[in-house]
Amino acid sequence: MPELADIFRAASPDYLAKYGERMLPSHKRAIADILLCRTRALGGKTYFCNSCDVYRYSYHSCKNRSCPKCGNDDATRWIAAQNALLLPVPYFLVTVTLPAELRPLARKNQKLVYSLALKTAAKAIQKLARDPKWLGGEVGIIGVLQTWARDMTYHVHIHFIVTGGGMSPEGKWLPARYGDYLMPQQALADVFRGKFRDALKKINSEKLFAQVPKQVWQTQWVADIEPVGKGRSAIKYLAPYIFRVAISNKRICRFQDGRVTFTWKDNKGVRHAATLTAEKFMSRFLQHVLPRGLVKVRYYGLFSTRKRDQLETIKKLFGCVPEENDNGSSGQAVADVRVIKCPKCGTPMVFIGEIKPERNRSP
């Protein structure tokens, strides 16, 4: 089966020749890294199986967050690290979406708009959570930016994991009053719209604000709120949104005559296939490569860094003990010990030595 690197290897010379002067450095870096990922060029390690008399070469990954070959190990470590952060309460997945009318602005001003959307959406959640009508306290929030729909089209939205309860100003924990209901969806969307509008107008002058069609401030924005269980189950639910990229290699089913066919599922689980030219496919993928330095995972409220001390105090109210991971260890991040097994007999292989990189990773 073809991989993203195969498509880039065949199509990137023409793509770079055509668009290179206008491309963002982050896009060029993504192409270069994906082409080199897990090849001898980045170096690696050599292993040997005493039973089968077989060598195996394990090459280093590129660590680019847009690479479909990277991220699985990071996801495992991230999940383990979050266990020490979470409270033993129900959680909700809150998803807010930027309307289509704002996508041109977001595409041209990614760092500004993405950061603004994360910040204002979190403030909207906090505003409603502090309202005694719904909760009356400070919640913990983990937010994750995502820019793609399932068919890789441009669709900016944010997933938040939110505690199903909050801390009152008097230091009392207030659980969500309605069990599987946190706050009204449309009210959240309306507050998000207002806060985003006001922040955009204030942060970047009337010139940028004037690029937005006026009707977008009168239309209904979209927010969705769903219960997602407790503790580790909520984090495991969120982890794929953090480490998944716009398309995985297993969804690419054909690359022939300069055209790429890939599959995707709609919201009802029905599988579809789409075929694009290699150039169009690369363009659709690269639009989801985030600008360098943009943090796509952010913590707010009780989970923010400046409130971690308060979080520890709250845990004592629940009589918390460290949660256990699936391997029975405590909630702290576990050591990354990787055992390489022989592909023939399955027995552990012996480490022989390092493979030095053949070249640097400059674009």
Image (cartoon, rainbow, N blue to C red):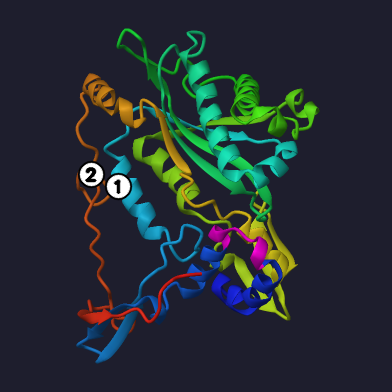
Residue lying furthest bottom: 53
Q: Which residues are magenta?
A: 20-27
In the image, 357 versus 130, the foreground residue is: 357
Q: Which residue is mark 2?
A: 332
At which x and y percent is residue 101? 75, 37
Residue 262 seen in the current view? no
Magenta segment, prevailing SS (helix, strand or loop): helix
In the image, 117 versus 165, the foreground residue is: 117
Residue 201 seen in the current view? yes
Q: Which residue is mark 1?
A: 80
Q: Residue at image x 54%, y 51%?
A: 290
Reply yes or no: does residue 188 show up in magenta.
Answer: no
In the image, 298 versus 268, the foreground residue is: 298
What's the amino acid at mark 2? Gln
Asked if marks 1 and 2 touch (Cβ < 8 Å), the reply is yes
Report which quarter residue 234 is drawn in: top left
At which x and y percent is residue 332? 23, 44
What's the amino acid at mark 1? Ala
